[in-house]
Image (spheres, rainbow, N blue to C red):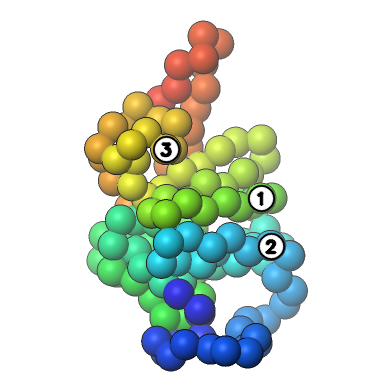
């Protein structure tokens, strides 16, 4: 989950090889999100619960991989096995919702790629 291409522990800060400037980072239980200055999010680490939004074909990644389907992202957040993204005043979610932690009506469902969390006028929500 360090995005360095291996599974070695690091005792000193180590530069992640990525072009451009990273303006934000979020750390989950076994995954990392990196927000690039151009609004693209990169993820690495475990994707077993969909927490880095790379679909069902990849259980994880040792290198930073771009996460698609959200437009330009402004803010990122991670929990133990889920991630949230703010893009143009829209919230996208991915990962485990076993305890309702994603504020979405997908109880016990796992989302393996980012889904738009749509709010209605009555405070109810659904995903698309």
Number of numbered discs visible in the structure rendering:
3
Question: Is 96 placed above or below 11 here?
Answer: above
Query: At which x and y percent is residue 19?
Result: 67, 81
Which numbered disc, 1 or 3, marks the residue that appears first in the sequence? 1
Residue 107 is labelled as: none
Q: Is residue 67 left or right of residue 112?
A: right
Question: Is 7 placed above or below 86 here?
Answer: below
Q: Which residue is mark 2?
A: 24
Question: Which quadrant does the N terminus fall into?
Answer: bottom left
Identify the secondary structure beneath mark 3: loop
Identify the secondary structure beneath mark 1: strand
Which of the 4 image quarters holds residue 47? bottom left
Res. 41 in view: no
Query: At which x and y percent is residue 4?
Result: 51, 86
Cα distance, mark 1 to mark 2?
Answer: 7 Å
**Label 3, residues with CA under 10 Å away: few <14, some 14-19, many ≥20:** some
Which numbered disc, 1 or 2, marks the residue that appears first in the sequence? 2
- The answer to whether mark 1 and mark 2 are in CB contact below 8 A is yes
Question: Is 78 placed above or below 4 here?
Answer: above
**Label 1, residues with CA under 10 Å away: few <14, some 14-19, many ≥20:** some
Residue at (47%, 37%) from the top-left corner?
116
Q: Which residue is mark 3?
A: 101
Residue at (56%, 38%) from the top-left corner?
91
Q: Which residue is mark 1?
A: 75
Question: Is 37 placed above or below 18 here?
Answer: above
Which numbered disc, 3 or 2, marks the residue that appears first in the sequence? 2
Cα distance, mark 3 to mark 2?
Answer: 22 Å
Residue sticking out furthest to the top: 122
């Amino acid at each position: 989950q360090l995005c360095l291409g291996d599974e070695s522990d690091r005792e000193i800060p180590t530069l992640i090889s990525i072009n451009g400037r990273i303006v934000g980072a979020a750390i989950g239980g076994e995954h990392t999100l990196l927000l690039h200055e151009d609004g693209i999010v990169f993820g690495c680490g475990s994707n077993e619960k969909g927490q880095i939004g790379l679909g069902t074909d990849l259980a994880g990644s040792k290198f930073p991989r771009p996460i698609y389907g959200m437009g330009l992202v402004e803010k990122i957040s991670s929990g133990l096995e889920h991630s949230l993204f703010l893009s143009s005043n829209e919230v996208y979610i991915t990962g485990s919702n076993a305890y309702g932690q994603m504020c979405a009506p997908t109880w016990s469902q796992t989302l393996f790629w980012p889904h738009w969390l749509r709010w209605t006028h009555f405070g109810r929500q659904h995903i698309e």
